[in-house]
Amino acid sequence: MSESKVELDDYQASEYAVEFEDKSPQEVLEWALDKFHPKISIACSLQAPDVTIMDMARKINPDARVFVVDTGRLHEEDHDLMSELEEKYGINFEVYSPEPEHVHDMVKKYGINSIYDSVALRFLCCQIRKVVPLMKSLKDLDAWITGLRRGQWASRYNLKKIEIDHEHQGIVKINPLADWTWDQVWDYIKENEVPYNKLYDKGYKSIGCMPCTRPVEEDENPRAGRWWWEEKAPKECGMHCSVEFGGFEKYERAILGQEEEKSEKEKSEED
């Protein structure tokens, strides 16, 4: 199989999205893996939809790639699940982590739990711990696969199974479970004995970083357990959609650009 870059434009992606709208996740994955492998990878957040896709994909192609963004603040149950999945599927996860100096500068300037102080600082933390590592993981890919579903949150209601990801250099984004319900995901996990995150047994319905996630009541929306202390803020981290908020970008530049500014200042003083 050729490893030359495979590209689609918006029109082609829309055509494929229409063609595969009524197809099963396995059919979508079979097409995607055939067309883009090895320059395609599954984004695994260690949640139920992602392990469902992993199981499907590895049955289609045992060499299907999978990556994990380890933010440095994951639950122990997340790492336990990674070990389980590695053993069952014989997989070596491609793990991406935040830059230590970026985390160090953020914590030094704003504190270890600044996420609770303002929405802007929470977005900053997500940007450093999640978004920047994600950008690295997608850098050399032609396409990526997610476990996103339309029923997860309002920002995902118009999700297509195949689309162009303009947030990440125009690569193709595949969402095989876009039209699946939560019950369908769990039916698959049970029927196929797929390892799952044990946090679900403790009342969690949507799993993120340890300090940003809590269990929810049966009648609560699953996303209610994410950043629950915030009011009227998007239940997003920026990995899958642009957060309609510009403040965190300014703070990010302030932190990530500190060394550059310091260097320029020292150079100016020397001159």
Image: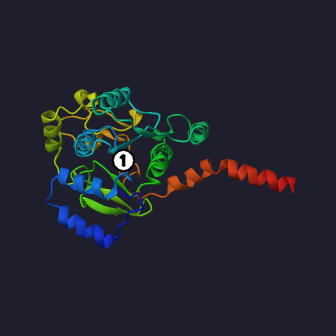
Q: Residues within 10 Å of mark 1 (few under 14, many from 20)?
A: few
114 w.r.t. 172: above or below: above
Percent across and percent down for residue 240 are: 36, 53
What kind of colouring is applied to the model shown? rainbow
Residue at the front extreme of this rendering: 1
58 w.r.t. 232: above or below: above
Which of the 4 image quarters holds residue 194? top left
Side of 160 where 230 appears, left or right? right
Side of 162 where 187 appears, left or right? left
Q: Nearer the viewer, residue 121 or 139?
A: 139
Residue at the right extreme of this rendering: 271
Q: Which residue is at a point 37% across and 65% down the rendered structure image?
A: 7
Side of 56 where 187 appears, left or right? left
| SS of the residue under disc 1 | loop
Disc 1 marks a residue whose amino acid type is Glu
Percent across and percent down for residue 189 are: 18, 36
184 w.r.t. 174: above or below: above
Q: Nearer the viewer, residue 151 or 19?
A: 19
Q: Which residue is at a point 41% across and 59% down the rendered structure image?
A: 244
Q: Which residue is mark 1?
A: 231
Percent across and percent down for residue 83 are: 35, 28
Which of the 4 image quarters holds residue 116? top left
Look at the image and tell me in which quarter the N terminus lies.
bottom left
Look at the image and tell me in which quarter the C terminus lies.
bottom right
Q: Nearer the viewer, residue 106 or 11?
A: 11
30 w.r.t. 44: above or below: below
Count the marks.
1
Q: Nearer the viewer, residue 44 or 41?
A: 41
Percent across and percent down for residue 265 are: 77, 53
